[in-house]
Image (cartoon, grey):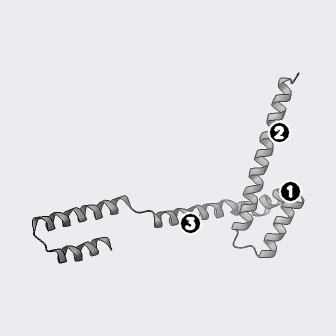
Amino acid sequence: MDYPLLSVFWTMLLFFGFVLWLYLLFIVVSDVFRSRDLSGWAKAGWLAAVIIIPLLGVLAYTIFRGDSMGERAFEDAQRQHALHQAFRPSAVQSQGVADEMAKLVALRRNGEISEEEFQQAKSRVLA
């Protein structure tokens, strides 16, 4: 089995070029769907151009709409980060709640507050 080094290099180059092409195609298609300024017909037109004549469609899309692709990606990343931050509990806040609960338990244990006062304070801290 004879497979020269130049053929190995050429095969690797074609493989990585194909992977790069698939990545670029995925980026363009996702950007078409992410665009809020395109109508449904415009999105369908760009998708048809990318599917029917892929090389020219992707090149035309990057020429005509490439300048705003980065802006849309940045806005999407900011939106995802804001959603993640909204649902992630803050470590400082949870530590503060734990400290407050520990203080309330110590006060109840020492008899400085009654059970009713403890329950009211607990509901206020956990709310």
Pointer 1 local density, CA inside 10 Å: few below 14, some 14–19, many at least 20: some
Q: Which residue is mark 3?
A: 79
User: Which residue is found at the position 80% from the left and 40% from the top?
Assistant: 15
- Residue 88, by quadrant, is bottom left
Helix, strand or loop at label 1? It is helix
Q: Are marks 3 and 1 in contact (CB under 8 Å)?
A: no
User: Which residue is found at the position 89% from the left and 58% from the top?
Assistant: 53
Tag 2: residue type? Leu
Tag 1: residue type? Pro
- Residue 5, by quadrant, is top right
Question: How far apart are the alpha carbons under marks 3 and 1?
Answer: 30 Å
| Circle on res. 54 | 1
Q: Closer to the camera, 106 or 70?
A: 106
Tag 3: residue type? Arg
Helix, strand or loop at label 3? It is helix
Residue 40, percent from left and from top? 78, 75
| Circle on res. 9 | none
First in sequence, mark 1 or 2: give its number.
2
Residue 66, percent from left and from top? 74, 60
Q: Which quarter shows the N terminus?
A: top right
Q: Are marks 2 and 3 in contact (CB under 8 Å)?
A: no
User: Which residue is found at the position 80% from the left and 45% from the top?
Assistant: 18
First in sequence, mark 2 or 3: give its number.
2
Question: How far apart are the alpha carbons under marks 2 and 3?
Answer: 37 Å
Q: Is residue 98 left or right of residue 66?
A: left
Say if 103 sits above or below 122 in the image: above
Residue 16, percent from left and from top? 77, 40
Q: Which residue is mark 2?
A: 14
